[in-house]
Image (spheres, grey):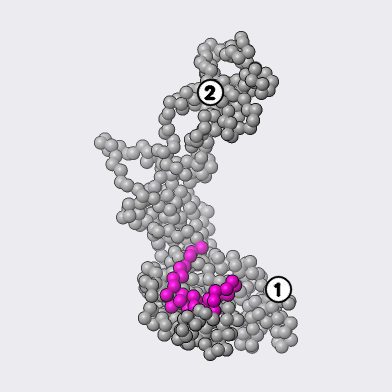
Amino acid sequence: MTQHRSIASVWLPRFGMDLWRRTAARERDLPSDDDLVALKVEGAHGAVIHALSTGAEAAGIRIGQRIVDARAAYPPLHVEDADLRFEEDALRRLTGWSRRWCPWTATDGADGLVLDLTGAEHLQGGAERTLLDIEERLGLLGLSTRTAVAPTRGAAWALARFGPARAVVGTEDLEAALAPLPVRALRIGADQAKFLERVGLKTIGALSEVDRVALARRFPPRRGLTDPVLQLDRATGRMPEPVVPDADVPRFLARARLVEPVMDVAPLLQGLAVDLCRALDREGVGARLLRLTIYRIDGERREARVSTAAATRDAGHVARLLAGHLDNMDPGFGFDLAVLEAVRAERMDARQTDLTGRADPEGNLSALVDRLTARFGPRAVTWTDWRESHLPERCERPVPAIDAPPVETAFVSSPARSERPLRLFPHPEEVRVIHAMPDGPPRRFAWRGVSMDVARREGPERIAPEWWRDRPGTRLRDYWKVEVADGRRFWIYREGTHDDGRGDWPAWYLHGLFA
């Protein structure tokens, strides 16, 4: 048996019908749940029943039955079309909303949820209280439920669908609780279940008593078939079966659970930030990606995300960053739970300020980048990222400043960089140049309709093309730093030489401006 775990399975036996009744009730009067109502989907041989009302189930109509057969036996049957895509999307949103009970939640088929409550069930007062809260809140959304908690995912799934309406089973009672359940509870195929029932193995307990070698020989692994031995081992805990969440799961979080729904999250923000930063400080880490989520009472959730340029655990800074995103979080009819999570965290060692006690300028720059990015977006706040290239336009590129700490990218100093102009044009602008010799230095040039005489010049600096990246025939460049009479300095280059055999007479371009 693996280490103790608490896996909750939530089965929504009439999810399609409950969802249809909840959404269609806004538009028209609906038949009662005791009436004969069915939802249909297209099958291989015509329309088949996808979901049923309570009255239709009591009358003996079956899911998967053809509509023509059901209507022939029950003429009053009311049939509507099912929207499978809408149901899938609703279940996905419900899975995210279920993270109010624990971070590890996932969909379980087309009509169920699975939650790994390990280490989180005490937040509700235990597994039993957690199931009661799940049933109550989903019931308020108009959803029928059957729930179970067990040490394994397979056992929780089996108990929720074939056990009592609500079951909480511990490790010591697991095998006894599974023994009377039918073999279909092992999540095997219908044909395999029928075969086992025909040979007298109708329950999980009976199957457990069979020699495992003989059982494995009779059911060898085959494509498209489920291994009963493997499923039995998963249900009893001999084989692990983890719960893989549908979204990223944070390691650090802070919760604010409310007795009554409220409409404004702003008063809770500072307290959540303080609690989260305390947890980060205990582990010696800082947050790089933060997510604030509100869980609304209508089964929806809204979230806001902010990133930081450097790891932080400053509660005031975190609260200020998130405050600018609260206007986009629609509370609906109110929310009763707010969660602040550090989705991504990095190691953050404590730093001592200088002897004067002044604040760290690097930290101030990171905070400034965070505030600007939170207000204007990551594409609006950039700085330079260096790349290996000797061509000026390729050795640097703008990147979002939020993606890397400023101390690693913003203040790079090198001898080569000091010789480059402060401003480079994205696209060099062609100029007309007068020079004494074919390959001589410029004496006079015209740029944007203005002619300027060269008072001083320095160069040339020859930059050859990158043969491994440029197309054949690319010409070399000769750069000059030139200063005109009014003191302005420019960076111009000649593309090619007159005798290189790679084109017409060389052209001149202005590439940048010096300060």
Q: Is residue 97 visible?
A: no
For image coordinates 57% across by 30% down, the residue present is 466
For mark 1, what is the residue?
42
Residue 11 in the image, given as x and y percentages of width and height: 52, 76
Q: Looking at the image, is 178 positioned above or below residue 153?
A: below
Residue 297 in the image, given as x and y percentages of width and height: 50, 67
Label 1 crowd bin: few (<14), some (14–19), many (20+), radius 10 Å:
some
Q: Secondary structure at mark 2?
A: strand
Q: Quadrant of residue 502?
A: top right
Task: Say left or right for 353 vs 504.
Answer: left
Q: Which residues are magenta?
A: 219-246
Quarter of the image where the N terminus is located: bottom left
Q: Looking at the image, is 286 positioned above or below residue 89?
A: above
Q: Quadrant of residue 448?
A: top right
For mark 2, what is the residue?
513
Residue 471 in the image, given as x and y percentages of width and height: 63, 32
Q: Earlier in the sequence, mark 1 or mark 2?
A: 1
Q: Secondary structure at mark 1?
A: strand
Task: Say left or right for 490 vs 175.
Answer: right
Q: Nearer the viewer, residue 381 or 493?
A: 493
